[in-house]
Image: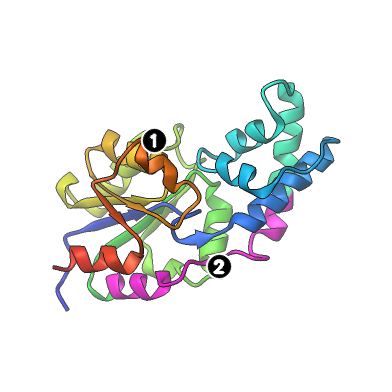
Amino acid sequence: MPSLSDLLLIFDLDGTLIDSRLDLAHAVNAARIHTGRPELDHPTIFSYVGNGAPVLIRRALGDAAPQSEVDSALEFFLEYYRHHAVDYTELYPGVRESIQQLSASGAKMAVLTNKPVRISKFILDHLDLSPALFQVYGGNSFAQKKPHPVGIDTLRAEAGVERDKTWMIGDSHVDIETARNAGVASCGITWGFQPESLQRVPPDVLVDTLGEFVAQIMR
């Protein structure tokens, strides 16, 4: 097996490694019911994911909702989600095998998500993916969320890896813009929440399975 010890692979979480759609949708609708609103259909909620919980709840309640109501709904959402984050959430097919293959090859791997870091680590622990990762950063780990490059810059510094040896892998334009802003390569995946957004912001590489990406970088 070729060594990939000189590479840093940074993964998005929701829609990339994990299928968390149902748990997120249930938590968003619980927050809407908490504010006296009817439930939203799941595809609409899925389209709101990617920029962190505060943006998700603002979108779910609408622009006309007062900030005080958004803040209350966000607090309710986070508490509800904390207790229901792994009711239905699971790894996408092939993810575990690909991560194990990359780990065996010596690649440095991390997660950079706009989801709060504490719940992100809980989910990764529950799915037994944490041992393969040297770091996990969330939307509240830095002053700025993706697509700001601070997360990638910090991970590169911690791993001691140059830009030309770093990849950002994700399912939405937010991940590709983050990679561009940080000056690193990007891989878009087609099975996530917002693959259509990759048409607006094309990645360097687009794959239909994580195994396909692994095969490309192992050539």
106 and 21: which one is in front?
Answer: 21
Q: How are the residues colored?
A: rainbow
Residue 91 pos. (x, y %) = 50, 67
Residue 210, picture quadrant:
bottom left
Q: Spatial distance from mark 1 to mark 2, Cα to Cα?
A: 25 Å
Question: Is residue 180 part of the magenta span, yes or no?
Answer: no
Q: Residue at x 45, y 66 (%)?
A: 130
Looking at the image, residue 168 lies above or below residue 211: above
- Residue occupied by mark 1: 147
> In x, y percent, where is residue 171?
41, 50
Res 178 visible: no
The foreground one among 74 and 35 is 35
In the rendering, at what x and y percent does residue 54 appear?
A: 61, 35
Judge whether residue 22 can be spotted in this image: yes
Identify the secondary structure beneath mark 1: loop
Amino acid, disc 2: Glu
Instruction: Give me the disc on residue 87.
Output: none
Highlighted range, magenta: 80-103
Residue reaching furthest right?
36
Q: Which mark is residue 90?
A: 2
Q: How dense is the environment of label 2, judged by Cα within 10 Å: few (below 14), some, or many (20 and up)?
A: some
Q: Amino acid at mark 1?
A: Pro
- Mark with earlier residue (1, 2): 2
Q: Does residue 131 appear to the left or right of 127 in the view shown? A: left
| Left or right side of 152 for 120 | right
Is residue 99 positioned above or below 35 on the image? below
Eyeballing the image, is 89 above or below 70?
below
Residue occupying the point 36% across, 65% down? 209
Residue 196, percent from left and from top: 43, 44
Residue at the (56%, 42%) spot, across then down: 47
In-front residue for pair 120/201: 201
